[in-house]
Image (cartoon, coloured by chain):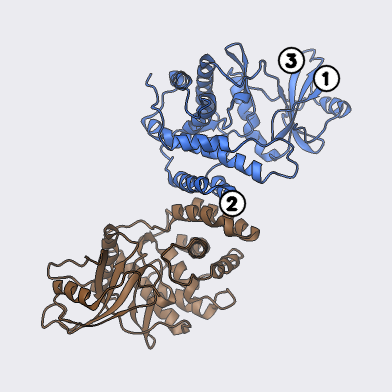
Chain colours: A brown, B blue
Amino acid sequence: MSVFTPVSDAELSAWLQQYELGELSSLQGILAGIDNSNFFVTTSGANAGKYANQSRFVLTLFENLKAEQLPYNLELMEHLANAGLPVPAPIRNRDNIYLGTLNGKPASLVTRMKGDWSDSPSVARCAAVGDMLAKMHVSGQGYSKQRENTHGNSWRIRTAIAVSRFLTDAELGLMETEVALQATFDRSHLPVGAIHADLFRDNVLFEGEAIGGVIDFYFACTDTLMYDVAITVNDWCMGSDYQFDMAKYDAFLRAYQAVRTFTKEEVEAWDMMLRAAALRFWLSRLYDYFLPRPAELNQPKDPRHFHRILSRLVQGTPAIPTC
Amino acid sequence: MSVFTPVSDAELSAWLQQYELGELSSLQGILAGIDNSNFFVTTSGANAGKYANQSRFVLTLFENLKAEQLPYNLELMEHLANAGLPVPAPIRNRDNIYLGTLNGKPASLVTRMKGDWSDSPSVARCAAVGDMLAKMHVSGQGYSKQRENTHGNSWRIRTAIAVSRFLTDAELGLMETEVALQATFDRSHLPVGAIHADLFRDNVLFEGEAIGGVIDFYFACTDTLMYDVAITVNDWCMGSDYQFDMAKYDAFLRAYQAVRTFTKEEVEAWDMMLRAAALRFWLSRLYDYFLPRPAELNQPKDPRHFHRILSRLVQGTPAIPTC
């Protein structure tokens, strides 16, 4: 599980006095997630005011992100929620502040989204995610804060050098080629904006075929929009044979483009973006697997999953469907 | 030794019939050099024509470079020689062609330079090299051919990933940081031109304190001029304690700037260029040491030399003397 920093009922009750959310009803640690300590929090609810109808929240204690990095992410969530998208909104306390400190960690309370995630999404759900990602990208164009991707080119290079000793010769050859290719690939002509950067299946909650919530914005940053599409497609539209499920692939990309049409340059860069996305998670999983942090309690994910995806992608990429 | 492809007197005599250089007098393999097969060639001399006064040449059989890469290098040598600099000039045959084939390898004959190299250059010799490098850079501004550096960013990344398994933890940390830093360092504002890229002590021949010849242009390419200065200073001005010999350092940089003044941006980038130069040779020596080619006959050079230089450089760089 992944509650690195425990929180007691008494500690949280005292902390909640800063908010107009009523009294603490229940507190429960969340097992999912690998980077922060997360809790479901229920309160008796506010008598009045902005949060009068809300009683279900998620409390996050940030274990690795520093407080100065968080305004980008939390204000993006607020920006998207204000635009009507199903994104957790940070709760502001009596002093209008959305980020505090609890048990020595930066801590924030956000609205809890409805629904559940599923490991085997339908074609319709893939289309819904394509539609939602495009809406987030369009809405994000109005978000003015900037944050560099902490998992960009420099991170790729450092991580590849750190983990290469654990690779087979064949993996090493692929790693050398791909990291060097991505380092010299010119993305400057591709549209940039606020990206989620981690929109895997466990970060979208569904109620039936409708999206109840998009969660976990803590890798969000300013980067190439098409790279975010690639990260998402590599997860949602991937078949068990490490080839794209073409029904899901087409449905996702059509739904996205019904909201935001890709530029000619984005279409041309698509294969490199898919490869960059596979490389990023191959690298982070290699790192977590072979060089885990001392406090890491989660079972690391198998790095070979993204090695296999990348190996397929370098052989070619299906065309983007035209709308 | 490093004659990979043998050449007999009979083979060379036949080949020389294409040239107006008289008959072969002597042929002798050269032991120095790690990338090509080199020979001293003496002929009876031409009776007349462009090469009437010349009888001493160097024959090179190119073992790794492909024929299509060579025009950049050989025509640069011709360009610099025509500008009056002591650089080997490629000899053109009766058909005005300077690059042929001998024993299956691209082959070229160039004028042989006078003098000898020394492992312990005086301050005066360092100044002479600074002056000469600046003159080559200025003259090279008039050379229009372009060739990408084969040992640039992409090569650095691939090589670092390939060799990292052979590094200690401390070396690995330095490697990660430096390769990533160089990959994201913006050089676009620094002057670019034809650079020698390998102007080590064994590539400058002296007659007394005067330069008799600058040789071995086979790494020459189009790249940042200040990077070439850094490669050269890291070799010529380095003390035995891996710190700069300040008398040589100042003499070199003053002599260079008497010919071409550094821009403000070049001065600001100087420490990063010195580090890039040390990193490049640390990487190539690591590669040659741990992953030698099957045909490699030379004793590989100790990679730790440039690891030590780089370790010093990251602690700080002496200021460039003002003129």
In the picture, the quarter occupied by the N terminus of chain A is bottom left
Mark 1: secondary structure: strand
- Amino acid at the residue labelled 1: Ser
- Name which quarter of the figure residue A28 lies in: bottom left
Mark toward the viewer: 1 or 3: 1
Q: Is residue A136 visible?
A: yes
Comparing B277 with A133, the one in front is B277
Whole-number angstrom distance, CA of label 2 to CA of label 3: 51 Å
Q: Looking at this rendering, what residue extends furthest in the right direction?
A: B10
- Name which quarter of the figure residue A128 lies in: bottom left
Query: In this rendering, would B156 be left or right of B114?
Result: left
In the picture, the quarter occupied by the C terminus of chain A is bottom left
Q: Would you name the residue on which mark 2 appears?
A: B165
- Residue in the picture at 55% in, 75% down: A244
Mark 3: secondary structure: loop
Q: Would you name the residue on which mark 1 appears?
A: B26
- Amino acid at the residue labelled 3: Gln
Whole-number angstrom distance, CA of label 1 to CA of label 3: 14 Å
Comparing A221 with B16, the one in front is A221
Please determine whether, in this image, residue B173 is positioned above or below residue B247.
below
Residue A93 percent coordinates (x, y):
16, 70
Residue B225 percent coordinates (x, y):
49, 31
Q: Residues within 10 Å of mark 1 (few under 14, many from 20)?
A: some
